[in-house]
Image (cartoon, grey):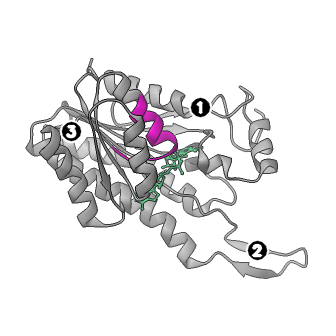
Amino acid sequence: MLNIKDAVAVITGGASGIGLALAHYWAKQGGKLVLGDIAETPLKEAAEQIRGETATVVCDVTQEADCERLAATAIERFGKINLVAPFAGIIKDGLMLKIEKTGKVTGKMPIEDFRSVININLTGVFLTVRECAEQMINHDCTGLICLISSTGSLGTAGQISYSATKAANSVMPRVITAEFFRRNVAHRIRCLAVAPGYVGTPMVRSMPQRVQDKIVEQVPIGRLIEPEEVAAFVGELFRNEALAGDVFFIHGGLRLGSKG
Ligand SMILES: NC(=O)c1ccc[n+]([C@@H]2O[C@H](COP(=O)([O-])OP(=O)(O)OC[C@H]3O[C@@H](n4cnc5c(N)ncnc54)[C@H](O)[C@@H]3O)[C@@H](O)[C@H]2O)c1
């Protein structure tokens, strides 16, 4: 079992929602933090709220140089990386085609909307993980790369871009674990994904209330998941070294599209 005390976590999307909750949880357990986010002011405020050793890096995860800088900061400041949590992500929901009652198509999802979700949720995750894993390997670190998928990975109407990126995030732990296994690294650097259902963060709370009400109707525990519940789950996934190469759901019993 691994211990969080003095372990170093690199968290992107660390200024809000699940990333911020994980940062608080990690610091409370005595861990050290490198928080990355594109939102400069919220990132600064997050670091001020969190007690403990925290470095911040204003970064855009779609930019290779920013991700290099993020990983390098962890090594310069703390000499190691033990947890990589590439949680920066966005949604830009919409239908691929707007089909009117007449049966005709009157609109299409703009390619810019589709690309922006792919760039942040998929390319950004790849870059963050590649840069941090390089540092972990070269500095003999032990720990976990914890991607964040979603129940959306199973396919949600109105989320073609988001669902596609989250399905990709679900398969990456298998690829990375297999690659590390081949090179005798998998015993010390594990990779897995946590896949939450609907979590009460700005991402979900910014949806219209009627959409949120419909969502909660589908959740057997009758509420959104708390970001702190996801954070504590990531802590358990970090500690337990038997967990690797798979996707672990936390969704309050949700089954997409039906009440079971
Ligand atoms: N909220 C949910 O219901 C839910 C469910 C499953 C998975 N997730 C995933 O959890 C992760 C965090 O989601 P959240 O709900 O906490 O969202 P959030 O909107 O509260 O936080 C996302 C953070 O990412 C940052 N960010 C966005 N683009 C960035 C970029 N290019 N570079 C760096 N930072 C950037 C934002 O500034 C923000 O601080 C996402 O990957 C999301 O897909 C969320």
Residue 71: give x, y in percent of width and height.
Answer: 21, 50
Q: Secondary structure at mark 3?
A: loop
Q: Quadrant of residue 151?
A: top right
Going from the N terminus, do you reach mark 1 or mark 2 first?
Answer: 2
Q: Which residue is mark 1?
A: 226
Is residue 124 shown to the viewer in this render? Answer: yes
Is residue 14 shown to the viewer in this render? Answer: no
Q: Secondary structure at mark 1?
A: loop
Q: CA distance from mark 1 to mark 3?
A: 26 Å
Q: Quadrant of residue 94?
A: bottom right
Q: Residue 81's mark?
A: 3
Q: CA distance from mark 1 to mark 2?
A: 33 Å
Q: Residue 134's mark?
A: none
Q: Kindly identify the amino acid type of the residue bearing the numbered disc 1.
A: Glu
Query: Residue placed at 64% from the left, 75% from the top?
Result: 109
Q: Residue furthest right?
A: 102
Magenta part of the chain: 11-24
Q: Residue 98's mark?
A: 2
Q: Kindly identify the amino acid type of the residue bearing the numbered disc 3.
A: Ile
Tags 1 and 2 touching, CB below 8 Å: no
